[in-house]
């Protein structure tokens, strides 16, 4: 059933996001081309104005894509599960879990795709191909020196990259689930549902910030003697530990928000 | 054999209280849930379909408590338009086919075609009456054990009501039970085998429609007007 739900989720959201992705590619192409033209001797006033306009339009398309992706993801959850369409979705022979997972997976896929496309386009506009090869060779040199001096090998580097990717994924998931949980709780109210959702969003957001701050203080206090033996090797170990801690914290927050959302949709649903 | 059974079912919302209700709907029977606006008809239907949970009592569909398994046996049409307005009618037929194994897509397509609804049309392009009929066609194209129709005549013209009535009568699966909530009794009178009168969440009167007509010497419509006279 999850696969079928995903099919309809992608269809419902793609109609907003794909045209904006296409616009982003067109705008980044136009901006990159106008900048290259400017750099290759076309120094007239018209070329400069064209380059400026295309760069501004490119950044506007980046902002539009980022904003619309967020709005579509949140609005889709609200409209499809808490609005009139909720009667259809909650009458399907599926539990609330595939309903939530289908929304979450689709949202994560769109955030990853739009994020990657935005970064790729920004770098394409900002750097020429020869700059890229220079950056890559410098990075390779840095890694070789680190490896020779401190024994930081490829496996460790890969582990850091994977942990960072996981942390980013869980951080994005927890942000999406924060919206879902707030809407699901706010919608159980009989009146002022959206206002209540906004209040709960702020409250839960504040709570997560406080918990993170508290854990950071505790971690900092318990590591107070660590700086005395600081070197690059121990710094790498500290980085690993902090990444693992961040992953655990985000995973726990995701589980809490998911369970809250599932509980509210399964037990406290209040469709109008 | 009872398809739907409710025993001591109750649920409260602020000052409104539904129940305690005890009744059943048997195979092959049509139960009319009759009452004025705000009498608790929609709340009761939501309880049966598991959209809200009871504070107490029990509801079962073919022995199953409301949940994914029972919803596979229930075909539900809410009072509100539930169809996503961005979807095409053909997409909705595929949607129902994807999620309900008992959905007869060919029957739905035939009925939609007879209504003049093009499968390429989006729901938002349909008139209010056609949307209501499309929703009903999709609901009645399932071979369900229990049909729950919440105010199927609401907001449509008399000619459309005839179509809706005909679709309900010809569409239901053999041996299924049908629960229809309405306050337009005259339209549904011929359809009803049993009735349950609801007022302020309480059962005022219930029983076989024919027996009530005989005992009271009047139609269900006339009885409704007498019971709920302002």
Image (tube, coloured by chain):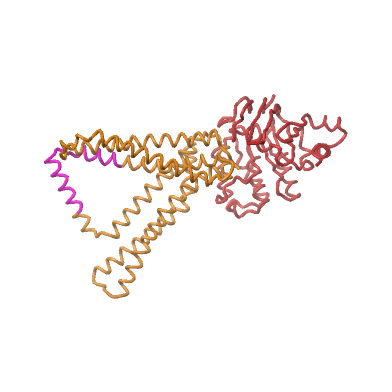
Chain colours: A orange, B red
Residue A79, how many percent across, how many down? 53, 46
Where A69 falls versus A28 (above or below)? above
Q: Could you tell me which residue is drawn at 35 percent across and 54 percent down?
A: A118
**Residue that lies at the very extreme toward the left in this rendered image:** A149
- The tally of labels here is 0
Quarter holding residue B72 = top right
In the visual, does A255 lie left or right of B128? left
Residue lying at the far right of the rendered structure: B217
Q: Residue B73: name its quadrant.
A: top right
Please tell me which residue is depicted at 72% across the width and 42% down the height of the picture. Answer: B37
Q: Nearer the viewer, residue B23 or B126?
A: B23
Front residue of this view, candidates B225 and A114 = B225
Q: Nearer the viewer, residue B68 or A247?
A: A247
User: Where does the magenta region start and end?
Assistant: A135-164
Horizontal and vertical percent for residue B214?
86, 31
Q: Residue at x 31, y 57 (%)?
A: A122
Q: Looking at the picture, how far across and down is residue B92, in whole percent? A: 57, 45
Q: Is residue A189 left or right of residue A6?
A: right
| Magenta-drawn stretch contains A138 | yes
Q: Is residue A257 magenta?
A: no
Q: Quadrant of residue B78?
A: top right
Horizontally, residue B84 falls left or right of residue A258, namely right
What secondary structure predominates along the stretch shown in magenta?
Answer: helix
Residue A181: give x, y in percent of width and height.
47, 40
Q: Quadrant of the C terminus of chain A?
A: top right
- Answer with left or right where residue A22 lies relative to residue B15: left
């Amino acid at each position: 059933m999850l696969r079928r739900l995903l099919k309809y989720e992608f269809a419902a959201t793609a109609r907003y996001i794909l045209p904006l992705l296409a616009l982003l590619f067109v705008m980044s192409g136009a901006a990159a081309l106008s900048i290259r033209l400017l750099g290759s001797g076309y120094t007239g006033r018209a070329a400069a104005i064209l380059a400026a306009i295309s760069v501004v339009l490119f950044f506007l398309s980046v902002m539009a894509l980022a904003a619309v992706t967020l709005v579509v993801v949140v609005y889709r959850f609200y409209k499809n599960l808490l609005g009139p369409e909720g009667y259809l979705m909650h009458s399907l022979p599926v539990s609330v879990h595939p309903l939530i997972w289908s929304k979450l997976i689709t949202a994560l896929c769109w955030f990853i795709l739009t994020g990657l496309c935005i970064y790729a386009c920004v770098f394409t506009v900002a750097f020429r191909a020869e700059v890229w090869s220079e950056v890559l060779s410098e990075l390779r040199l840095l890694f070789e020196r680190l490896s020779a001096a401190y024994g930081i090998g490829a496996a460790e580097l890969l582990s850091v990259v994977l942990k960072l990717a996981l942390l980013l994924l869980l951080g994005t998931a927890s942000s999406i689930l924060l919206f879902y949980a707030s809407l699901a709780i706010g919608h159980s109210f009989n009146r002022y549902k959206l206002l209540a959702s906004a209040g709960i969003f702020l409250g839960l957001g504040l709570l997560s910030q406080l918990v993170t701050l508290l854990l950071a203080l505790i971690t900092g206090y318990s590591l107070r003697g660590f700086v005395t033996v600081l070197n690059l090797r121990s710094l790498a170990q500290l980085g690993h530990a902090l990444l693992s801690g961040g992953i655990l914290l985000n995973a726990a927050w995701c589980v809490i928000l998911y369970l809250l959302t599932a509980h509210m949709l399964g037990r406290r649903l209040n469709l109008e | 054999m009872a398809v739907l059974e409710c025993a001591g079912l109750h649920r409260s919302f602020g000052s409104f209280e539904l129940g305690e209700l005890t009744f059943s709907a048997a195979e092959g029977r049509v139960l009319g849930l009759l009452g004025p606006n705000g009498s608790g008809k929609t709340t009761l239907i939501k309880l049966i379909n598991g959209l809200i949970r009871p504070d107490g009592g029990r509801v079962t569909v073919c022995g199953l408590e409301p949940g994914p398994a029972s919803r596979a046996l229930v075909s539900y049409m809410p009072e509100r338009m539930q169809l996503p307005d961005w979807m095409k009618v053909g997409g909705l037929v595929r949607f129902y086919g994807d999620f309900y194994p008992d959905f007869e897509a060919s029957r739905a397509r035939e009925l939609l075609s007879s209504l003049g609804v093009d499968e390429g049309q989006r729901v938002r392009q349909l008139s209010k009456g056609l949307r209501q009929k499309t929703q009903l066609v999709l609901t009645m194209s399932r071979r369900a054990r229990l049909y729950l129709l919440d105010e199927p005549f609401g907001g449509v013209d008399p000619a459309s009501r005839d179509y809706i009535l005909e679709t309900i009568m010809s569409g239901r699966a053999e041996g299924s039970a049908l629960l229809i909530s309405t306050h337009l009794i005259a339209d549904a009178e011929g359809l009803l085998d049993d009735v349950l009168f609801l007022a302020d969440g309480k059962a005022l009167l219930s029983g076989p429609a024919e027996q009530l007509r005989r005992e009271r010497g009047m139609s269900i419509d006339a009885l409704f007007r007498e019971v709920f006279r302002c």
